[in-house]
């Protein structure tokens, strides 16, 4: 039992070292959603969706960071590998879904599905590493997914910003805060 507990703690620690991904994607999606809302509602810009090109920068930064981290990692645990491939799989899934929604011209209906998947991603990640705030974040995204079906696209953009605050940004800062607290306890 103590081996399993230490593996979970190691994975949480690695995740806190890599709150980078939560922060990167949370803030990129937040900026893209708010940016699109402003371009759509304030400036009435016809190509308001161009803000989502930020995701390509996020993909490139994630790949570079992952490669660098992989070179530095001396010990690979089952949990770390699970989380790594879970993240890669989610990234591939979101990319393919984006192409599908754009190709079928359904992009205005994509966000409820994304919220549902953000909830799934957060909930499962929280379950894997036994981290309750991520599970609650998943539940919040599921509620946002249901609500989003009943509002117009422009409001879904604001719900997107809210969803990533719950799913990525808040957990990233909570995890980072717990890491700082652990480090302070070690220094004492």
Image (cartoon, rainbow, N blue to C red):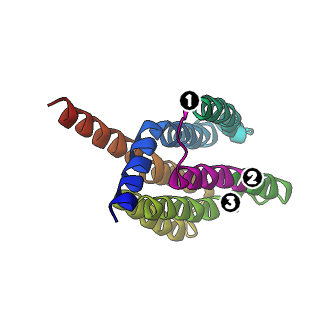
Taking depth in this image into account, of 149 and 173 the one nearest to the observer is 173
Residue 72: give its label.
1
Please state the extent of the stretch shown in magenta in the rendering: 72-93
Can you identify the residue that label 3 sits on? 110
- Residue 40 falls in which quadrant of the image? top right
Q: Is residue 91 left or right of residue 165?
A: right
Task: State yes or no: discs 3 and 1 in contact (Cβ < 8 Å).
Answer: no
| Residue 154 visible in the displayed image | no
Q: Residues within 10 Å of mark 3 (few under 14, many from 20)?
A: some
Which tag, 2 or 1, sits closer to the chain's start? 1
User: If you read the primary sequence from the N terminus, does the residue marked by circle 2 or circle 3 appear first?
Assistant: 2
Distance from label 3 to label 1 (Cα)?
Answer: 37 Å
Vertical relation: 67 (above or below) 26: above
The residue labelled by disc 2 is 98
Q: Quadrant of the N terminus?
A: bottom left
Q: Quadrant of the C terminus?
A: top left
């Amino acid at each position: 039992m103590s081996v399993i507990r230490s593996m979970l703690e190691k994975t949480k620690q690695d995740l806190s070292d890599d709150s980078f991904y939560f922060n990167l994607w949370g803030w990129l999606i937040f900026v893209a959603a708010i940016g699109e809302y402003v371009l759509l509602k304030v400036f009435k810009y016809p190509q308001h969706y161009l803000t989502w090109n930020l995701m390509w920068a996020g993909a490139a930064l994630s790949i570079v960071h992952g490669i660098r981290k992989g070179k530095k990692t001396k010990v690979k645990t089952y949990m770390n590998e699970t989380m790594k491939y879970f993240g890669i799989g989610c990234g591939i899934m979101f990319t393919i879904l984006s192409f599908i929604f754009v190709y079928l011209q359904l992009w205005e209906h994509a966000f409820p599905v994304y919220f549902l998947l953000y909830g799934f991603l957060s909930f499962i990640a929280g379950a894997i590493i036994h981290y309750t705030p991520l599970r609650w974040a998943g539940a919040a995204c599921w509620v946002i997914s249901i609500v989003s079906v009943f509002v117009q696209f422009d409001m879904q953009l604001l719900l997107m910003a809210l969803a990533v605050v719950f799913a990525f940004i808040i957990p990233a800062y909570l995890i980072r805060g717990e890491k700082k607290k652990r480090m302070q306890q070690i220094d004492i």
